[in-house]
Image (cartoon, grey):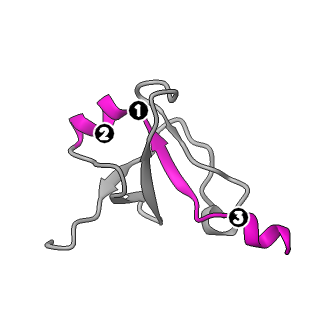
Amino acid sequence: GTIAGLVRDPVLRLHPSDAARRAIAEGDTVLVSGTHELVVALDERVSRGTIVVPHNLEATKGLAAESVVTVDVMRGDS
């Protein structure tokens, strides 16, 4: 096997209470800063008011560490 086979698709991790306030559920796809589609993983270890996104993967290339990002839920019915 190769290391590439071990890499999973990147996820956006956020605290469950932040997700609930925004009507975001585990597994939802969100648009981060208008440029990157990521699947949500709820994680109580993430500080409230923050998100965790891997920056070392091809799928998140160009997504800079910023003090303010937007996270918009992508709904299939919109």
Mark 1 or 3: in front is: 3
CA gap between label 2 and label 1 equals: 6 Å
The numbered dot on residue 7 is 3
Residue 33 visible somewhere in the drawing: no
The numbered dot on residue 19 is 2
Residue pictured at 52% horizontal, 27% vertical:
45
How dense is the environment of label 3, judged by Cα within 10 Å: few (below 14), some, or many (20 and up)?
Answer: few
Disc 3 secondary structure class: loop
Q: Choose the circle earlier in sequence order: 1 or 3.
A: 3
User: In front here: 43 or 50?
Assistant: 43
* Magenta stretch bounds: 1-22
Q: Is residue 71 left or right of residue 51?
A: left
Disc 2 secondary structure class: helix
Residue pictured at 49% horizontal, 43% vertical:
13
Question: Please, what is the three-letter code of the amino acid marked with disc 1?
Answer: His
Q: Tag count in the figure?
A: 3
How dense is the environment of label 2, judged by Cα within 10 Å: few (below 14), some, or many (20 and up)?
Answer: some
CA gap between label 2 and label 3 equals: 25 Å
Disc 1 secondary structure class: loop
The numbered dot on residue 15 is 1
Q: Is residue 43 left or right of residue 3?
A: left
Question: Please, what is the three-letter code of the amino acid marked with disc 3?
Answer: Val
